[in-house]
Image: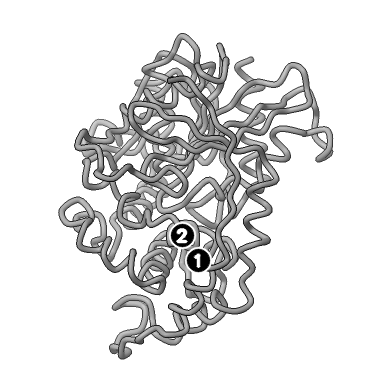
Amino acid sequence: MDEINPFRIDVPQADLDDLRERLRRTRWARQLPGGWSRGVPVAYLKELADYWAGAYDWRAQEARLNAYPQFTTAIDGQTVHFLHARSPEPHALPLIVTHSWPSSVAEYLDVIGPLTDPRAHGLDPGVAFHVVAPSLPGFGFSPFPEPADERPWSIERVARTWAELMRRLGYERYGAHGNDAGAMVTPQLAALDGEHVAGSLITAGLGVPTGDPAQLEGAGEEELAELKEMAARMAGGSGYGPYLAARPQTLAHGFADSPVAQLAYLVERFKEFDGWGSGAEPIGRDQVLTNATIYWLTGTGGSSSWTYYEGAAGLPVNQRAVPSGVTHGGPPVMRRIAERDNDLVYWGDARSPSHMVAMAAPDGLVAGIRAFFRAIR
């Protein structure tokens, strides 16, 4: 039951040819008035789809992923895929990193090198990590079985799965980091496996006001304005959250049959999160298309939405089992709120042009991870 199997991504050429053929045969919608306010514009999506069908090089991205050892193991009835990059430094701390929604392990490709081999990247080798980067259940190369397990994939269930994964790898003490969906899993993992987790570091989410007026006492005008802007971003103008919570299977049919439907959905998420389509996208289109390709090839566009239909989307849990940190902290009032219910030892002021921090600002994220775990070692 503890078997860990080597894994390598090797997509059949026929699958890539089929993807390109489907893209070229897309039946395009008519353009509605209103531009981005009514969804992804036809002309914008056509240009991106043409690039996907032509110049985009999946094999190059496949090689980047395969540059790191990959494995699968079965835990609680679920195949779990993960990258496992060990550091050459003998004192390295194991670190499990959990990716975002709607994203994949490809999110971490630009940070694994500096984290595992800081010496080769001009960084102090005194802080180094053995990086474990799993694909969330139902995402990418960790697809749900068919028929799907009827038991809910709660954040707690994922955290228990991660704890078992690290046990199987023989890691008695390890750190944890996550962003977005990963920021939900990481502190839950700390709460459940505090005996082994050294520290819980997320990009953001701790200290978000929950509506209690007492939480905002002492907040200045600038802080309140920043909180208001943040709340507007989190609201999600398209209303995708309530729909995914109610009818994910309906969207899944389009994701499974049309790569353009999958692409449009991902691009809209990046638009709402980061201003995609503005002409100054914070993440390169190859990065977005790599995620779209992974979702398409694995058929996980619908199943990746479980955080919504299981009611798992929300805010990270507070916990005092282990030290906590935030790399991209908000205004001081959020830090004060976070400190009430967490052993907060690090509150970074890093900024990222994108919600997908590891892809948009890898150097800043690496610096934050190194600073936090240096502080608690």
In the rendered structure, which disc, 2 or 1, sits on the residue that comes first in sequence? 1
Residue 59, by quadrant, is bottom right
Residue 41 vs residue 104, the one in the foreground: 104
In this rendering, would 108 be left or right of 3?
right
Instruction: State the residue position of label 1.
Output: 15
Residue at image position (15%, 53%) is 246
Residue at image position (50%, 16%) is 167
Residue at image position (53%, 65%) is 289
Q: Are marks 2 and 1 in contact (CB under 8 Å)?
A: yes
Q: Please, which residue is most extreme toward the left here?
A: 246
Question: In x, y percent, where is residue 363?
Answer: 68, 45
Question: In x, y percent, where is residue 268?
Answer: 38, 67
Instruction: State the residue position of label 2.
Output: 297
Residue 365, by quadrant, is top right
**Tag 1 secondary structure:** helix
- Give the amino acid type for the residue marked by disc 1 in the picture: Asp
Within 10 Å of the Cα at label 2, are there few (<14), some (14-19), or many (20+) other Cα atoms? Answer: some
Question: In x, y percent, where is residue 198?
Answer: 54, 16
